[in-house]
Amino acid sequence: MLQSEKGIGLIEIIVAMLIFAIGITAAIRTLPVSNTATTRSRNLTTATNLAQQKIEELMGAPFNNTELTAGAHNDQNNPIERIYTRTWIVTDNDPVIDMKTVTVTVTYLSSSHDNAVTLSTYLTSRR
């Protein structure tokens, strides 16, 4: 037999295993980062949906509803899903007379600094 036809040696197998181990280690190290990003995205999406839900609920309420009186309001279901807190602020005659500005804020427990979603809308008595 020729020298090149002898097969794979022990050194080649060890080198291949080392390359494979480095690749697996790199892949495993990315898992916590991707898990954190997924959790952050899920929390942000849920907070946005909760804020939008409250805005739509308030838009469907009568203009003189108690939830639309001027001032700060807290959701009676707080904390929602154990980590979300929903509040809203109503400002009368803003930006013009017979209009209200409603700003809904949903905060959630998170280790990141951006743990709140705020949405605003305007309501008028002529709807």
Image (spheres, helix red, strand yellow):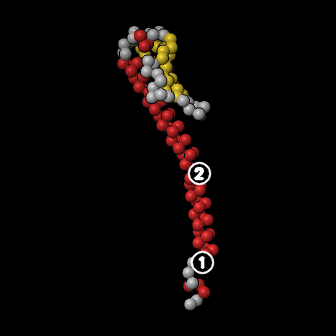
Residue 61 left/right relative to 87: left
x, y (%) of residue 25? Answer: 59, 56
Quadrant showing the C terminus: top left
The amino acid beneath tag 1 is Gly
Residue 58 left/right relative to 93: left
x, y (%) of residue 51? Answer: 46, 26
Q: Residue at x 61, y 70 (%)?
A: 14
Give the class, few, some or many, for how many residues have Cα within 10 Å of label 2's Cα (few <14, many ≥20): few
The amino acid beneath tag 2 is Arg
Residue 21 appearing in the image: yes
Of residue 114 and residue 25, the one placed in the foreground of this image is 25
x, y (%) of residue 36? Answer: 55, 41
Q: Which residue is mark 2?
A: 29
Considering only vertical position in the picture, is 31 above or below 58?
below
Q: Who comes first in sequence, dot 2 or dot 1? A: 1
Considering only vertical position in the picture, is 65 above or below 84?
above
Quadrant showing the N terminus: bottom right
Give the class, few, some or many, for how many residues have Cα within 10 Å of label 1's Cα (few <14, many ≥20): few
Q: Residue at x 53, y 44 (%)?
A: 35
Q: Which residue is mark 1?
A: 9
The circle drawn on residue 52 is none
